[in-house]
Image: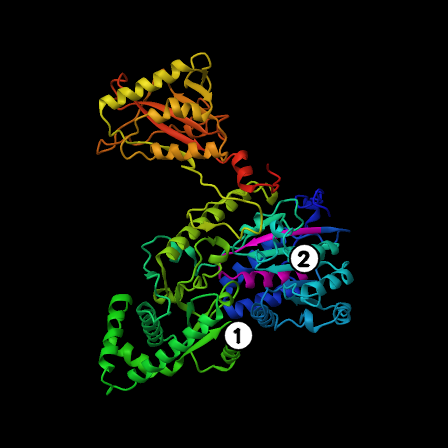
Amino acid sequence: MNNNTIELVEHIGDDESERIKSIVIDGKNAICMIDHLIESRGQMTANHIMNNAKNALSFFANPENTKSNSKILCLGKVQSGKTAFFISTISLAFDNGYSLCFLFGGTKNNLLDQNVDRLSKDFANNDHVKIIILKDTSENEIKNLLSKGYKVIVVVLKNVSSTQSNLYCAVDYATTFCNVPTLIIDDESDEHTPGAPILKNKNPRAGITHDVITEILNLFRNVTMMFVTATPQANLLLSTLDTLSPNYIVLVEPGEDYTGGDAFHDLMTNEHVQVIKDSDDFKSSIPESYKRALKYFMLGVSIRYILGHDEPYSMLIHPSHLTRVHKNIVEKITIDLEELKEILMNPKNVIHSAYVNEFKVVFLEDHNSSLDFSLVMKTLIERLEQYKVYEYNTTDTGRKDIEELEIDDHVNYKIYVGGNMLGRGVTFTNLCVTYMYRDSKVSAIDTLYQRARWLGYKRGYFDICRVYMTLDLKEKFVAIADSERDLWNSVNEFLTTKIDLSEFKRIFSLPHDKLILTRKSVSKTITFERIKPGYTYDKSVLFDKDEINENIRLVNELIETYKSDLKEVSFALGDYQNHLLIEDKFTKIYESFISNYIFQRNSSLGPNSFKKILQQVESGQIQNNLVVVIMRYKTGQYRALSLQGHSIKELPQGYDPGSGYPGDKNLTGLENKLHLQVHLVYTDKNSSEFKIPILAFSNPITRHSIRYATGDAFYDYL
């Protein structure tokens, strides 16, 4: 396809006849899965997982149709059980006309192996399902299994490093089995799948994973593809004309015991995240903050053991993406750990008591435990041989350590050191302490949040969970948690009225100046700041009479300037509401009115907000247009003062069912326009003569701002 051609993709996602009409929930595969989930996780959790799976099935392509496809974005939260969700969904799919499943099980072998292990365990009680790895099988083997009535799951490494790699082989298999109703699951689908269209001209291999997966999808006649991720920014920023743009979105709700971003990163004051210095990087020596984190970990797991929880626990160190750094740190902290063990196990050592006192300080200051310290320390010392450090990366020593993990059953307390491999998809048993300091100056939300391995089902031991990171990282994670909350709320709101994902507005909150949504290679999108988004208003009346008089003069001057173009509107039945409308260029009204207006002390708007908007208008981010509404200009409006007398209790008037007035926040025809309201407020109920001009400002998301943010990408709702 040449660069001047637009490929029109058949859009069948919003046609209910193309989806499964009646979902079978009590088939033999689902029953086996439910039995397994009840045995391993309990009835309540089993029901929750299967309900999420059933929700996804409602958007599946109908396997009985001649040709049908559906693409579903499955949005879960980091470490929230997405693997259990899609495995359970596979079992339901097998009971509803699907016979074959391709699982793109990650870009790295460790994630693929983890997925294979989970599949094997979760389908262990089901003789009707066969799990095979693509590189270890053949087309004839799959044909033979399907002919005998088996359901087949083929695990594929999402890799295109050579023509012999898994994805290229999957193209051949898709050709062979194109008539078999097939489910494709793309685990961690935001990684590589969305492609890199910007770079293609410079690098022909950029975006090739996207192209190969597109080819695989197009080969099947009856297919559903599930894009599973916790960070969907890259998936959502694909143009809706792209073959891999999802038709639907499913929220994979976490279970009750999930501790996510809100548990760790709701506020900067959250005690579960401790700030370390930027210089605590192991370069010259082992940082004191790491030593404290290690003591916290050792004390915490000892407390858990005393309370009857003889379970394995993990500590994670995230230093750098450079493997030579991992090796250096592993050597340092292994020596340090062995020295610590030797000193603690020898009471006659001259510094034994000093070390014990250091543990006591951490116990008293950081652990909220009623246990006797001497008992905790005695238990810790008795179990010192349970601690071991592991290098977790792709080097020879890293692979050797990973192999040792399988046989080190006697090691209950593992300390991992690594970089990229410690990111997306990898799960560590009962991870309770993380030490993290590496970061780039500007971070992509999706890449950074995937490193948050400390999130998950931790409510049972949340009291001993702690993350140690730099101040900059802590601020970023608070911002990302806020962005995640905003995204989930937006999706929930969207799903109350619509299901066609092409109509979902691709606008994301970005509450930190050192964060970007996703890697810049994914799309041509840019970010821009929305100043005072939504409807913002002042309530303060802290200014003197001269300032009020000057603002009244400015309002009257504004009305006089535009007297020939003024419009009187009511937005309601009858003459109950009377307002004046002025419309002109933002720059012109800013110069004549806004820049001269005296803002209230402690104003929530203030002159700086409007200066920033002026800059955005001048740069083209916002259209150069503003509507000014002089609210209730004939009568003004009474507003009661707060108890302190420094502000009014509330400014905007709400919806009035009697007159049909939509409310000040929703003025008919202005919902999507930048507009400024001037309210003429009096605070003495017995006299309306003395009026105070108070401003309210509406800065909505507009088609212009969406187009500015998304660049050349196309979205149906535009």
Q: Look at 74% across and 56% down and name the residue there.
A: 219
In the rendered structure, the answer to whether residue 380 lies left or right of residue 441 reads left
Q: Which residue is mark 1?
A: 395
Q: Secondary structure at mark 1?
A: loop
In the rendered structure, the answer to whether residue 69 lies left or right of residue 472 reads right
Q: Nearer the viewer, mark 1 or mark 2?
A: 1
State the colouring used for the structure image.
rainbow
Label 1: how many Cα within 10 Å (few below 14, some 14–19, many 20+): some
Disc number for residue 647: none
User: Residue 333: within the magenta?
Assistant: no
Amino acid on which the number 2 mark rests in the picture: Ile
Residue range in magenta is 69-96
Q: Look at 57% across and 65% down and name the residue there.
A: 34
Disc number for residue 213: 2
Quarter occupied by the C terminus: top right
User: Residue 70: within the magenta?
Assistant: yes
Q: Quarter-wise, where is residue 437 in the image?
A: bottom left
In primary-sequence order, the first of circles 1 and 2 is 2
Q: Nearer the viewer, residue 326 or 272?
A: 326
